[in-house]
Image (cartoon, coloured by chain):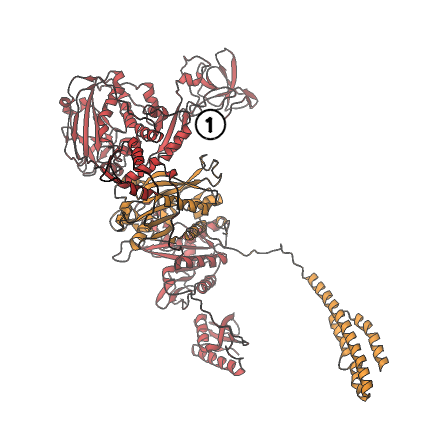
Amino acid sequence: MIDDITRIVGAAPALIAGASSVEELRAVEADLLGKKSELTLLKKGMGGLDPEGRKAAGAVLNDARESIEAALGVRRTDLERAERASMVATEQLDLTELLELPERGSLHLVTQTWDRLVDVFIGMGFTVAEGPEVETDWYNFEALNIPAAHPARGMWDTLYVDLGDPETVLLRTHTSPVQIRVMTDGEPPIYAVMPGRVYRRDTADASHMPVFHQIEGLVVDRNISFADLAGTLEAFTSAYFGGSIHSRLRPSYFPFTEPSAEYDINCVFCEGNGCRTCGQTGWLELGGCGMVHPTVLTNVGLDPEEWSGFAFGFGLDRLALMRHGVDDIREMYTGDVRFLEQFPS
Amino acid sequence: MKVLLSWLQEFAPFPGDDPVALGGVMSDLGMAVESIERIGEGLDGIVTVKVLELRKHPDADKIQLVDVDLGDGEALQICCGATNLTVGDVVPLATLGTTMPDGMEIARRKMRGEWSNGMLCSGRELALGEDHSGIYILDPSLALGMPVVEALGITPDVLFDLEINPNRPDAMSVAGVARDLAARLGLPFAIPVPTVEELAGDAGSIASVDIVDPDLCGLFHIRVIEGIKVEPSPRWIADRLSALGMRPINNVVDASNYVMLELGQPNHTYDLAKVPGGALRVRWARDGETITTLDGIERTLTGGRDGVIADVTDSAVGIAGVMGGASTEISETTTTVLLECAWWQPMAIARSSKFMGLRSEASARFERGVDPEIVDLAARRLAELLAPSGARLVQGSVSVDGDLSVTPAVRVRTTRVNQLLGTAIATDEIVSLLTPIGFVCAAGADADVLLVTVPTFRPDTTNETDVIEEIARHYGYSKIVGRAPTSAHTGSLTPIQRDRRSIRQVLVGRGIHEAMPLPFLAPGDLARCGLPAEAVTVTNPLAAEESILRTSLRPGLLRAIAYNESHRTDGVSLFELGKVFALPASGETLPDEREHLAVALAGRDATAAANVWALLAQTLGLNDVVIDQSAPPAGLHPGRSGVLRRGGEQLGEIGEIDPGVLDALGLRERVAWLQLDLAVALAAPHGEHRYHHISRYPSSDLDLAFEVDNAVPAASIEAAVRSAAGPLLVTVNLFDVFRGHPIPDGRRSLAYRLRLQAPDRTLTDDDIGGVQRSVVEALGAIGASLRG
């Protein structure tokens, strides 16, 4: 019996090495260790041996099985590795051989700019207010201290609509009527920005559209000062344009603010050194601002002795154009996908 | 407003060495410098030469060869593109090495094989106006080789172009700009007193005025000037007017304009001989009254809106504050001038000039408000300017008041100043800021209060805040140290603002681009899109294409698709979030303005829109919305469209654009369409994605195919499956649709896979069989039969 085992163990390596696939190896395994294998039969034949002999034969048999199993395992691993390698070799793909790129949409440049601005102001504690695009004369002009026939009305070329009495309902010329609505409908303290679409009676050209976008900000609280305005705009400027860009205020006139100011920033192209975009001045005019005019506060039922506030506003489209170097505002509004897809985010 | 440095210097000793720095101060005072032009600079190296000979260029038609003499008798060859030269002309030559005002450097160079030793200059090249039609021809008697600056008598000067805000009437004059600037720079400012020799007599016996309507005219001041000889102005006056943008006409008109520019007082000169009795009347115009103005145009006036100056016969001889009349115009025969210096109601002039569409230098000043106290100074200054031609001011004046309000002294509190500005400016510092600009400060009731008398040239300043602005302006905005207010609030988006961002994210992820067509439509646009034509119209559109406010996003997006198709971009997917405007509801003033979302997918059928909708509904958590195809919306494909409905509410429309509409718009591709009224869609609570427990027990799938009539929507089959399957149903998916043999015409097979699972146990065959039986039974009831 020992001889039989020795013979089987001796023959096993050649049989195992002869298997050229995992499948063939499975057959060899059945031949060597399966139910009908010699080793299994020998084990069954051990019943006739005395306890001592059985113990000895059992140990030999077990050693034989283990050595064969180990050899099978090694061979199986080798064969599996080889088979995987040949499969992988046939599965090669050229990752640049693409038939159709998945399409990605895009947010409009105005939306991207809008969201970016709004996010900065939210970070500064502002809420975001909106209002109608068709407005009454009261919200767009009168409440803002611009009575009819006021020379300052010439500052806005207004589009009127055929509703109500002539020239009483209009397409808002700025987002300022939302300020009136916020102050009328709510109560201080107010910290809000109002982005929105505005309209002017303007012929479209490379830098003008009859329809464009603005964002305004309004703060009304106790003891709000011009210094707060300057500080807020400076904080916004570096948050939005980057730390190296600063702001300055210059005296100006708006009927709804006093003192009023122009809001300039360091030219973002030359960082204040002077270039063609900024006309060698190192500054870009961004928008207007000032302390909310006492008449405006009175118009919305707030006592100017108790409350004070500031407001600011600037164009949004121009920021979008500046960021991406677009030289014609009209491009943004044709819906040409060749333009839109250039700005995925 | 343009100002010359030399003119400013007549009022205060401004330094002339750094015009850019001076401009910087003007900007910082709120008189923004739009440009600085250096007159007579950059002309070094440009000299007078005489044309000796003109020859054809052998090799170029548009260039001729010009031999010129610099005074040394030698011929120097220049190539020149101009054709206005004749032999003997004296012209300016930029010699070699000259840097032109525009920065170009002149070098010896060959043009088509011929040497050019300099450049002959046009007026524009010399920065002497806009003329570039030919070479600037000089006086032929001039010596040759003389610097052109000398030849032309150009005095170097600096011209500042300032943007003046509407609240700065004082800065509409050279003197006013000088006053503001001198105050900031701490320089002494004074308006020179005109030296006029007055002629014995009495203006009051020569001229008179009757202010019939005192609410139109606050002050009417008349002086009489005799010995008028109409002739060209002296060169220096003409040059200054030209520099400031006014055309020199004759000495009388020019002196009038000069005084207006210098002192800010518009004035009018009448030929006294043409004013019967020298008598004038000031009144509101009568409706339909006509007058021919100085520009030769007959204008019809409107009663109560326009004001007139009339003569004794009550016929209008001028439009108050806007423009004089032709009938009393100065002419070569004029010998005596009736000079009017008036103060008109600003609002009246603003209204009159706006509605008449007639803006003049005078009206621009009157509507801001001029200084009533300067009228006689202005008159004497005008006489002074005319004196060299022999004109003499007659003694005496006529001065009649209308309604002229006086601003009471303004109470200014130092604490309020600092509270509003965020500064710590002391009271005496306030006094020293205000005094140089003419504000007179007196101590008030307590130490905190100043009583500030506003000068008459600052009618815009009437209250404490106005004065605080002046304090801030002269203190310097840049000196106010910024601080960020501490908001006790936290910023956030509103739910609708968050929803918009989600919507955009979903659509962009689906490969759809956001577009923003203009919200204006042309007449017929709505009808072409199959939509009702009623809409809000624009009263004063610039073009018919912009005369209607959209009631739907459809025309704009379809136009954008057509635009892309016409540029060979097919299969475009666009969306827009924007306002649409319907006529106001009854009793409302403003239109029914709503925010819509629309999606247009070119080259795709209605199912693409339905897929986008499904995704949006899932993202926003909009449940219980059905697609109702029973009444397809106008302008959409009748067989492939429906409305989105939640109960009785209509949220929007979905499907495909009607082929007729596509045809009308010239669109080649079909277009899948989705439109949502966001206010309606997002009004009900939504977006609450509640957690469903995930069972740990195995799930089983049950595939069932039903044959059903085409008229029965798949949505109702699915709804029936859901309700019949009961609580064991986890998901149900339509995985196959089949039409054709052996299914009879008009019917189709719909195959669903139901995933079943129990939260607490493994399913048994009985469980699954039970679900199958109830589903089959329920579907049988709506005409769907299980396929074998």
Residue A21 in the image, given as x and y percentages of width and height: 75, 70
In the rendered structure, which amino acid carries the disc numbered 1?
Asp
Q: Chain of mark 1?
A: B
**Extreme front residue here?**
B447
Q: Is residue B463 above or below residue B760?
A: above
Q: Is residue B479 above or below residue B340?
A: below
Q: Nearer the viewer, residue B461 or A141?
A: B461
Q: Nearer the viewer, residue B435 or A316?
A: B435
Q: Is residue A26 above or below residue B55?
A: below
Residue A170 in the image, given as x and y percentages of width and height: 30, 48
The answer to whether residue A210 is seen in the rendering is no
| Figure quadrant of the N terminus of chain B | top left
The letter of the orange chain is A
Task: Give the crowd class for mark 1: few <14, some 14-19, many >=20 residues within 10 Å.
Answer: few
Which residue is disc 1 drawn over? Answer: B102
Label 1 residue SS: loop
Figure quadrant of residue B579: bottom left
Colour applied to chain B: red
